[in-house]
Image: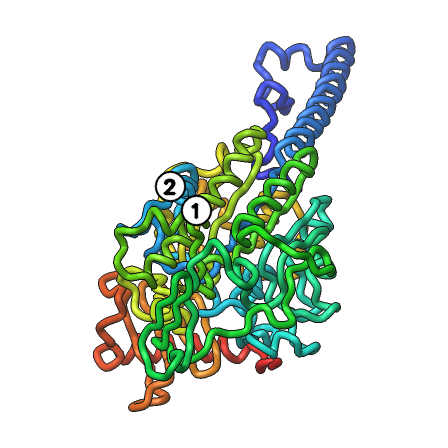
Amino acid sequence: MQCQKPILVPLCLRVRKQSELPTHTKVWKNSEKFGYRVRFIVRFMKFLYFQMFLMLLLTHVSIFAEVSPNVILLVVDDLGYGELGCQGNADLATPNIDSMALNGVRFTQGYVTAPNCSPSRAAMLTGRMQTRFGYEFNPIGAKNDDPTIGLPLDQRTIANVLHDGGYTTGLLGKWHLGSSAVFHPQRRGFDEFFGFLHEGHYYVPSPWQHVTTMLRRKVLPGGGEGRWMGDHLIYSTHMKTDEPAYDTNNPLLRSSQPVIETENLTDALTREAVDFIGRHKDKPFYLHVAYNAVHSPLQGAEKYMQGLGHVEDIHRRIFLAMLANLDDSVGVILKKLRDEKMEEKTLIIFISDNGGPTRETTSRNGILRGEKGDVYEGGLRVPFMMQWKGAIPQGALFQNPVSALDILPTIAAATGTQISRDLDGVNLLPYLTGKNSEPPHEYLFWRQGQRTALRKGDWKLVRTPNAKAKEAWQLYNLSDDMEEAYDQSDKQPAKLAELKAIWGKLDAEMMKPLF
């Protein structure tokens, strides 16, 4: 890794030209004896300078090796922009997740590259727009078992980069980037894997003991719509569809072998994370903890449900119980780092994979318009934080737009590992430390079928399927309209044309969908 700053030569070691020598020295310049002494001094000083340069270089390398950070990437599922205490949730305190904002940087305009799970993760792990390599859509259900669907093999992941840089790598939880053998996480750079391969998983095995479960149904028992209430099981027709068969052909795996897990899955992933940290604390590691919380199915553990009796809506109460469980789990991981005195040598990143599916789970996106599946802000702007004590500011807000694409280049810069191809993301460290005051991105691009968007500065271009105007473009100024309530496409035709031209140019660089 190259030094961030050049090694400066002390002025006292600079050898002056004869024209710069004092007058009384010039009088002696023809003296043979004096000339010999000057040559000796010059050679000696060059030798000293060379020795000092070597010492500084070796010291720099040694220090870098000592502080080369561990990396923990905490990816949560379907957590809306407004669901953390530090982002305005008045229903539930989330002190452990919020602590990363107090001890690091919170990005107020953090974006993902797709409004749903799999394509968002494809970009997050590669640092490249997923539409550049055809991973445009979100495979769910039986499509997960299509042997041709998965993260293309020519795309390198964060795990590939860090593994090749000498790191021990592990993935816990959700993969959702291909379930056939060729796409398995341990063939994509991860040394260890404990989790599942599809888009979701039940938190406890059937018959779902010690939780309250709420499932979607097209029709209630006995017919009709609304809610059917049992002791610890609730059916609801509010989404007019059935709960997906999440566990079908989708066992929990350790490496590639099915395992029986009796703990709540959120707790089990936390247990595995603590174990991984303990086993690998003597060497650099990358731990990717991909919680499936707070994704459906909605299953709230009893011990958290009991503390939320004041929440009248059972739908909301179950979701908050899952969020409280998630927050406690993040706290256990952070405590392990403190106990091992590893906080200052661990870069921790927290992000949600997309906006909250408010109608489905109650996961809220604050004042933002839309939800999971939309290219409005509610589907794309997510909770995003970064902590690295002693290296980046603490308690800071970063208010320029950033992207999940930036995670890989930032990690590579922090760890000194090599990236072998051009990325769409940028290294955020110079922006966080104040070395670069410019916005990290000139524009951000989105495409998922007919749902498309572009952000440049405060302006955002949106196109989304609409029964009245299928191809209509909308234009919003997010500086005073974060809710995307006032379409200015008619009032700002020049700005609309400018952004459409940029979007079209970028779109031409992308591939057709692979599936």
Badge 1 vs badge 2, beta-carbon distance below 8 Å = yes
Residue drawn at point x = 38 percent, y = 58 percent = 319
417 or 193, nearer to the observer? 193
Q: Position of residue 499 (x, y in %)?
A: 37, 75
**Mark 2: few/some/many CA within 10 Å (<14, 14-19, 20+):** some
233 or 122, nearer to the observer? 233
Quarter of the C terminus within the rendering: bottom right
Q: Which mark is residue 327?
A: 1
Residue corresponding to mark 2: 95
Give the vertical position of 278 relative to 364 (above or below).
above
- Mark 1 falls on what kind of element? helix
**Mark 1: few/some/many CA within 10 Å (<14, 14-19, 20+):** some
- Mark 2 falls on what kind of element? helix
Q: Position of residue 97 (x, y in %)?
A: 42, 45
Q: Could you tell whether 509 is left or right of 102 in the image?
A: right
Residue drawn at point x = 40 percent, y = 64 percent = 355
Q: Is residue 93 visible?
A: yes
Q: Position of residue 393 (x, y in %)?
A: 42, 37
Which amino acid does the dot numbered 1 rest on?
Asp
Give the mark nearest the N terminus, 1 or 2. Answer: 2
